[in-house]
Image (cartoon, rainbow, N blue to C red):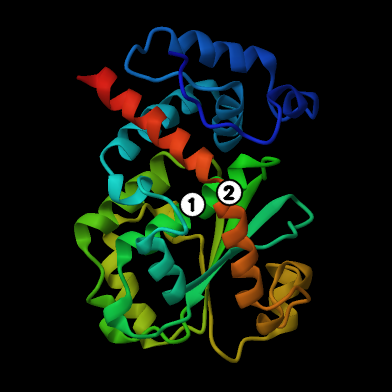
Amino acid sequence: MSAVIPKHNFNAEDVVKTGRTSLYNIAEIRKWLTYMPAFPAVSDEQIVLFLLACNDSVEFTKSTITYYFKHRAVAPEFFSNRDVDGDELTFTLKVTKAAVMPNRTRDNMAVVICGLRDTSYSNFYVESQIKVTLMLVDLICRDNPANGFIFVINLKGVGIMHVTRLKLSVVKKFFQYLQEALPIQLKQIHILNTSFVFDRIISVLKPFMHKDLYDMIITHPANMNKDEFFKKHIPADCMPSDFYGSLPDLDTLSEHTRVQLRRMKEFFEDDEQQMDTYRRNRK
């Protein structure tokens, strides 16, 4: 039986031609993998993603790949049953608006925006929210590789009771993956419509955050200067119309993203099989 490997919509050699990495570095990682019997088969495209995420450092890439499989293997709540038409994610996407913007910034950064559709705290399940977020990251990685991504979180409708839904064990797993294993660079985190609730949220999250991640956070009050935001941070053509940008509103963009995720059904299934191979190999 041939190995199951998630299929990406770009070619590793095309990325090499742009000078972002080299055939030599891909070969170095490929050689290293031959001495790592627990790891499943991976594609050149996966190797390229890790090299780009690690600024083309071979040694850093080895570490990130190791953590990638390690952290995914112990977090099935984030990386299994990723079917947007299944009961869990159908419910989650009724609670949350989540979208990858169709335009990238001038420096090839992808923009991801999330916010609540249903503000009832009892309908907020942190595991499923994280699952959707990481599916969006995989969506970005599957196509033409970005130089990184910018994460925008709209806190409108988030109340103090939402903080009680944060499970520390789940939060710890998420930040370990985010900081040690992500196959793309996270560049900025923008928090919109901040209030005293954000202070409570960050008090829960900060113990799990490295300083460099914490320093990425940029907060914006409800009355922020929109022109300054577009000039300093994210251009208007990468933001939804309900955030004063030139794209369609976030509801429309969320539905478009859901269609894209639906088309990734086979990708997510293959990804899960790749992880199953890793779990079996470790025994």
Q: Nearer the viewer, residue 226 or 269?
A: 269
Residue at 65% of width from left, 69% of height from top? Answer: 253
Give the labeled residue for mark 2: 139
Name the residue: 63% across, 60% down: 111
Task: Confirm whether residue 183 shows in the render.
Answer: no
Front residue of this view, candidates 225 and 47? 47
Up-down relation of residue 143 to residue 18 (above or below): below
Q: In the picture provided, is 101 more to the left or to the right than 51?
A: right
Q: Give the x, y percent position of residue 166.
A: 26, 68
Which residue of the protein is positioned furthest toward the bottom in this rendering?
223
Q: Quadrant of the C terminus?
A: top left
Residue at image position (46%, 52%) is: 134
Circle 2: residue type: Leu
Quadrant in which residue 103 is drawn: bottom right
Q: Residues within 10 Å of mark 1 (few under 14, many from 20)?
A: many
Q: Position of residue 26 (x, y in %)?
A: 60, 17
The front one of 18 and 228 is 18
Which amino acid does the dot numbered 1 rest on?
Met
Asked whether the residues under the numbered discs 2 and 1 touch, taking CB atoms below 8 Å apart as contact, a structural biologist would say yes
* Mark 2 nearby-residue class (10 Å; few <14, some 14–19, many ≥20): some
Determine whether 86 is above or below 223 in the image: above
Image quadrant where residue 1 sits: top left
Q: Is 104 placed left or right of 220 in the picture?
A: right
Question: Which residue is labeled 1 in the image?
Answer: 135
Image point (36%, 48%), residue name: 81
- Residue 190 visible in rendering: yes
